[in-house]
Image (cartoon, rainbow, N blue to C red):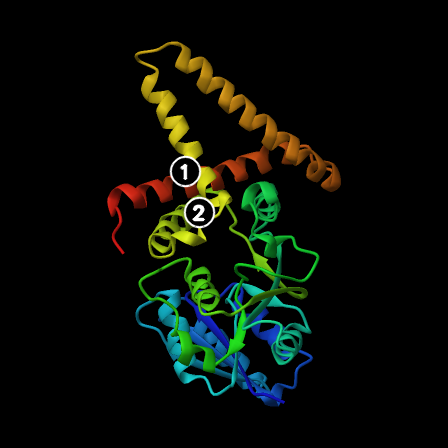
Amino acid sequence: MPYVSVIVPCYNEEKTIYLLLEALSGQSFPLQKMEVLIADGMSTDRTRAIIADYNRIHPELCVRIVDNPKRAIPSALNTAIQAARGEILIRLDAHSVPQREYVERCVDDLERGLGENVGGVWRIMPGGDGNIAKAIALAAAHPLGVGDAVYRYAVEAAEVDTVPFGAFRKELIDRIGGYNENLLTNEDYEFNARIRMNGGKIWLDPAIVSCYFARSNLASLAKQYWRYGYWKLRMLINYPATLRWRQALPPIFVLSLIFWLGLLPFWRVAGLLLGLELLGYTTVLVAASIPLARKHHQVKLLLLIPAAIAVMHLSWGSGFLWSLVSKPFQK
C-alpha cells in the first residue's frame, strides 16, 4: 500500500481548518500510511494554535506544518511537495472537507491507471449564514455560473481538462515540474495543462467527493472572480489552445456593456439596445433560478441567485479585460 502525503496551502483558516483535520482523521484509508502537510503562509489568526491542539489530542494523524513566507498558493504547494514523504500526493484546501472514502478512492484510481491526475466533484456549501451565502453557494454550483466546469456538477466519470485539487504520484513532478509560482490563481489548471501536453490524462471520478465552502458575501465573491479572470488571461497567454467558450463569454459581455454605454451620448438607440441586452440577460438568470427557488421554497432566491451569477460574470470578465490592458501579452 503506497504512502500518501496530503498537501494543503493555508493562510488564516481558523474557521475551517479543524473541519479538514477531522475529515482526514476519519478517512477509510489507513492513517499510518498517511501524513498531512500544511503549508502555512504565516497565519496571524488562531490557525496554527488549532493545528497544534489537534496534534496533541489526535496523535494518530501525522500533521506537519511547513512555512510558506511567500503567502501564495503555488509556492505553498511546492514547499509542501518538497517536504512530502509520500509517493502519492493529494492536494486539498484548508476550506474543504473530503468525504470518508476520499483518499482511498484517489489512491485506487491512480493504482488502476485511470489518469496521471485524478480528482472528484465539489459539493458547494454556504460560506456563512443567511440567504446571500446560500444563494452564492447555489450560483457557484450552477452551470450558468460556472459554464463547463463539470467538477461542480458531474455525475459520470470521464476524462476532463482539469479537476479541483487532484491526486498524483510524486514522480510526476520530476517529469513536468511543480506548480507555476508566477500564477497566483489558475495554478491547478496550468498544472493540468502541462500534464495533458505531456501525454497525460486528467480523470474525474464523481465518487471522489469533497465539500467546498463558497464565499459568504457578494463583495468577497467579486474579489474572488476578479482574481480568477485576471490570472486566467495570464495563463492563456502561455497556453492559448486551452481557451474554452465559457472563458470568452464574460469578457465579451462586459465589453458589450462598455460599448453601448460609450455610444449613449452620441446615439439614443444605444440606450434601448443596452436595455434589451440587460433585460434578456436578467430574464435568463431569473428563469434559471426558478427551479432552485422552488426546490428550497424561498422566493428571495429568484433575486439573490441572479445577483450572485451576475457578480461572477461581471467580475470575471472585468478581471480578464483588466489583465489584457494592464499587461498585454506579457508572459
Q: Quadrant of residue 260?
A: top left
Disc sitting over residue 225 in the figure: 2
* Most distant residue in the top direction: 268
Q: Tell me the residue at 27%/41% (across/down).
A: 325
Q: Is residue 24 visible?
A: yes
Q: Is residue 291 above or below residue 98?
A: above
Q: Is residue 109 above or below residue 267?
A: below
Q: Is residue 46 visible?
A: no
**Dot 1 or dot 2, earlier in sequence:** 2
Q: Quadrant of residue 267?
A: top left
Task: Give me the C-alpha separation between circle 1 and circle 2.
Answer: 12 Å
Q: Label 2: few (<14), some or many (≥20) within 10 Å?
A: many
Residue occupied by mark 1 = 251
Q: Tell me the residue at 59%/32% (across/down).
A: 285
Relative side of 262 to 173, left or right: left
Relative side of 200 to 223, left or right: right
Q: Amino acid at mark 1?
A: Pro
63 or 77, which lies in front? 77
31 or 241, which lies in front? 241
Where residue 52 appears, as percent x and y from the top left, is: 48, 80
Q: Quadrant of residue 253?
A: top left
Q: Is residue 40 above or below residue 224?
A: below
* Most distant residue in the front direction: 199
Q: Give the quarter of the figure containing the C terminus.
A: bottom left
Q: Is residue 101 above or below residue 84?
A: above
Circles 1 and 2 in contact, beta carbons < 8 Å: no
Label 1: state its secondary structure. Answer: helix
